[in-house]
Image (cartoon, rainbow, N blue to C red):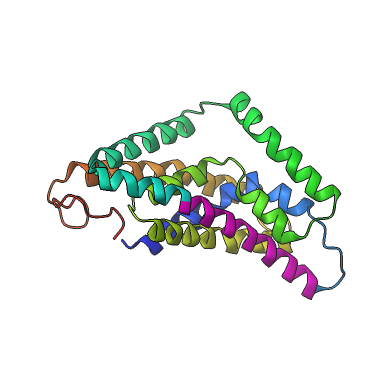
Amino acid sequence: MSVQYLAFLIGLMGSVHCLGMCGPLAFAVPTLKKGWGFLVLDKLSYQGGRIISYCILGAVIGFIGRQIWLAGVQQYLSMLSGLLILIAAAAKLFHFSAGRINAKLLQPFNQLFGYALKHKANHLIIGIVNGFLPCGLVYLALTGALNTGSVNTAVEYMFWYGLGTVPLMFIAGISAGFTSVLFKQKLNKMIPYMMVILGFWFILRGLELNIPYLSPAKAGTAICN
């Protein structure tokens, strides 16, 4: 599976989670000028801001991944990434809560977001702020970007991840509440299972079992090629 398809799929499937976590923030940003044209432009700017942040994070994580690749320990990185993803999936499946930790992490971002709203920052700026918000799904995407072993590919990975989150977030921003709570809950339940599949895939890639595409034997090849 190519880096574009994998990243886009994670973003698309996980956008239900984004809608629950970041949707209220997106809905709180007012459109200062009336009319559908301004509304669409503002919501697209907001989505573009988030993608810019994801690309910046991708560049940082890609640089780190590149150093790991040069050190020749990518096999262990892949297995460790898979293990961490499986732990995160288990936490979701068994309803482990890290509410206090999340609250502390979110506090400075909430203050920054509140400041931006108070001073009527444009949607692009607010989207950029939102993109840096601590989020488990973004961490999952960054894990994939880390395993690409290239700054450019990591940025590309995060771009396609961000693009995958756009359709549902954009439609929700235009018409808040268009999906039922039951629909969101059903799709949200799929995310941990997607994480389990991805986690085992990373582990298999690291084991190098000489299975084409799934677990290639050749070391030093980027995990998402």
- Quarter where residue 21 is shown: top right
Residue 67 position, x and y percent, is 33, 46
- Quarter where residue 103 is shown: top right
Residue at (78%, 75%) from the top-left corner?
37
Q: Viewed as shown, does residue 223 lie left or right of 111?
A: left
Is residue 177 something one can see in this rendering? no
Q: Viewed as shown, does residue 32 lie left or right of 219?
A: right
Quadrant for the C terminus in the image: bottom left
Q: Is residue 129 above or below residue 92?
A: below
Quadrant for the N terminus in the image: bottom left
- Quarter where residue 72 is shown: top left
Farthest residue to the bottom: give it: 37
Q: Is residue 127 above or below residue 138?
A: below
Q: Viewed as shown, does residue 112 lie left or right of 48?
A: right
Residue 205 position, x and y percent, is 23, 47
Q: Nearer the viewer, residue 121 or 164?
A: 121
Callout count? 0
Residue at (62%, 24%) from the top-left corner?
100
Magenta stretch encompasses residue 114: no
Magenta stretch encompasses residue 55: yes
Residue at (31%, 56%) from the top-left corner?
224
Residue 132 position, x and y percent, is 60, 46
Is residue 63 something one can see in this rendering? yes
Q: Which residues are magenta?
A: 37-59
Q: Nearer the viewer, residue 153 or 45?
A: 153
Residue 181 position, x and y percent, is 65, 47
